């Protein structure tokens, strides 16, 4: 991205060399006022004492080639008001006949009315409204320049985005029009990655654990990112906003939990990191000690590492052992190959393209956490409903990696599988967990958790966020 931005800047320099006489040394804001006054006076002398310009109302375009600094700044307000209309044609009309626009979120220079309108067709969907935070104004003979930093509030999302800007205005057909507009993202936010090492990643857990010790659910919720997702240990409801996270910890903190990491596996990326493993909680209210599996994905947000994703789950082997503790019938422990063969029964059911046939592979009390649905499916009808849409893709799966655990009358197969979608030809990898239990004489799926590959998901999310930030 750095190279493409540099290339655009060089291209712009060559394109505007003919009309933008701006090879002046950079001045401070205090120097700019006197310089602008000098340029203004020189422009007047050069035009042989032309009559003073008539004063215009603030909401009317400056209609004289003699212009003051305040009037230059008001030209931004005209452009910003055009954005507020939501009409890309009105915005494009603020540009000169022979313009150049180097937009914030497009690599393509826009050099005519149609291409500028095309850019704003999309940008205006975010309902942007801008405000200049700091700027530098310079004035010449029939041209003016305003450059600095502006901030946009996106009405469609509420996001605020800063960017750098340069406007060069020319006096054309008795109006001031934008001949050149260059808008770019803030480079420090874009290119600087926050470094973190493995021990520092593990230390982030202690910040969260210390928040638990306050017994203040809002303090705990503050450790999560603005768009976080919490899949709690003892709630079926995904928590995706502050209110939902606070609500969960209102109850959980009554047990006075304090955690300790027993096993940790850390992965570090560009402004994100991940810590997954096993932790153990001691409940101060009861003395109970509980183990769980955890996944924390952290992201750098507002100068802090925050939890973007937190998935906590009970230890499955222990739960299944308890479920089967009261069984009076003779137990049978399947072999690894027998466990893996159960996948093929499910895959063959997919091949029928019949949702009812697939749903019958699940137990009477199942739990399906599907790949492409946020909704847990815990009964026959909801599982059938999920496969109504999924089977339209004509999926067929193959296991790439498999890790089998087997016990008395239960077994578990975890790993990575890959689907080829017959309807589209697409090939998709995902992680899977199948837990099987005997129901009568048949092995049925008690639990099925399927999720996208996390490294790919985090990478796509980072790219998307960067694209939003660039806007």
Image (tube, grey):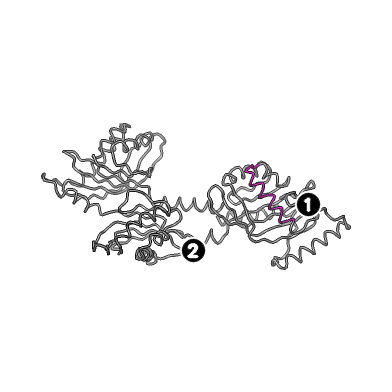
Q: Earlier in the sequence, mark 2 or mark 1?
A: 1
Q: How many marks?
A: 2
Q: Position of residue 364 (x, y in %)?
A: 23, 39
- Front residue (pair 345, 168): 168
- Front residue (pair 124, 170): 124
| Residue 390: in magenta span | no
The stretch of residues the image draws in magenta is: 71-88
Task: Check residue 380 in the rendering and tell me which mark sits there, or answer none.
Answer: none
**Element assignment for label 2:** loop
Q: Position of residue 18 (x, y in %)?
A: 75, 53
Q: Report how far apart the C-alphas of labels 2 and 1 lie in the structure.
A: 45 Å
The residue shown at (30%, 53%) is 234
- Front residue (pair 302, 423): 302
The residue shown at (87%, 55%) is 50
Q: Residues within 10 Å of mark 1 (few under 14, many from 20)?
A: few
In the displayed structure image, the side of residue 35 where residue 284 appears, left or right:
left
The residue shown at (42%, 53%) is 243
Query: Which quadrant of the figure has residue 5?
Result: bottom right
Q: Position of residue 285 (x, y in %)?
A: 27, 63
Whether 81 is drawn above or below 208: the answer is: above
Q: Residue reaching furthest right?
A: 48
Name the residue beneath numbered marker 2. 303
**Element assignment for label 1:** loop
| Residue 85: in magenta span | yes
Name the residue beneath numbered marker 1. 56
Q: Residues within 10 Å of mark 2 (few under 14, many from 20)?
A: few
Whether 329 is drawn above or below 39: the answer is: above
Q: Quadrant of the N terminus?
A: bottom right
Query: Which quadrant of the figure has residue 388?
Result: top left
In the displayed structure image, the side of residue 367 where residue 441 appears, left or right:
left
In the displayed structure image, the side of residue 169 where residue 128 appears, left or right:
left
């Amino acid at each position: 991205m750095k190279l493409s931005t540099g290339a655009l800047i060089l291209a712009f320099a060559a394109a505007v060399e003919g009309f933008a006489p701006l090879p002046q040394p950079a001045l401070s804001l205090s120097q700019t006022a006197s310089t602008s006054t000098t340029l203004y006076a020189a422009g007047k002398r050069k035009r042989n004492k032309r009559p003073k310009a008539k004063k215009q109302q603030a909401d009317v375009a400056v209609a004289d080639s003699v212009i003051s600094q305040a009037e230059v700044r008001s030209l931004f307000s005209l452009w910003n008001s055009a954005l507020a209309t939501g009409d890309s044609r009105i915005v494009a009309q603020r540009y000169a006949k022979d313009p150049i626009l180097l937009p914030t979120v497009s690599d393509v220079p826009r050099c005519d009315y149609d291409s500028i309108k095309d850019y704003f067709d999309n940008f205006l969907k975010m309902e942007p409204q801008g405000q200049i935070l700091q700027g530098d104004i310079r004035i010449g003979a029939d041209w003016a320049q305003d450059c600095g930093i502006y901030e946009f509030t996106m009405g469609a999302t509420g996001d605020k985005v800063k960017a750098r800007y340069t406007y060069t205005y020319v006096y054309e057909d008795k109006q001031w029009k934008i001949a050149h507009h260059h808008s770019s993202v803030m480079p420090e936010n874009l290119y600087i990655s926050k470094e973190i090492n493995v021990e520092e990643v593990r230390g982030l857990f202690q910040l969260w654990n210390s928040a638990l010790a306050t017994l203040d659910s809002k303090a705990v919720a503050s450790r999560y990112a603005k768009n976080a997702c919490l899949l709690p240990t003892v709630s079926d409801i995904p928590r995706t906003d502050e209110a939902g996270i606070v609500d969960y910890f209102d109850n959980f903190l009554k047990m006075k939990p304090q955690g300790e990491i027993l096993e940790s596996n850390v992965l570090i990326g560009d402004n994100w990191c991940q810590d997954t493993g096993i932790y153990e909680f001691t409940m101060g209210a009861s003395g109970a000690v509980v183990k769980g599996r955890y996944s924390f994905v952290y992201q750098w947000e507002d100068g802090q590492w925050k939890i973007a994703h937190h998935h906590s789950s009970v230890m499955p082997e222990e739960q299944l052992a308890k479920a089967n503790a009261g069984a009076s019938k003779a137990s049978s422990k399947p072999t690894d190959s027998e466990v893996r063969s159960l996948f093929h029964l499910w895959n063959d059911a997919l091949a029928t393209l019949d949702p009812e046939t697939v749903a019958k592979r699940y137990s009477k009390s199942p739990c399906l956490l599907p790949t492409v649905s946020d909704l847990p499916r815990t009964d026959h009808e909801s599982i059938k409903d999920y496969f109504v849409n999924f089977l339209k893709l004509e999926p067929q799966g193959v296991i790439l990696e498999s890790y089998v655990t087997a016990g008395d009358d239960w077994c578990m197969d975890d790993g990575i599988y890959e689907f080829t979608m017959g309807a589209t030809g697409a090939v998709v990898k995902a992680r899977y967990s199948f837990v099987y239990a005997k129901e009568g004489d048949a092995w049925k799926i008690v639990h099925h958790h399927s999720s996208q590959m996390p490294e790919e998901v985090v990478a796509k999310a980072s790219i998307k966020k960067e694209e939003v930030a660039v806007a």
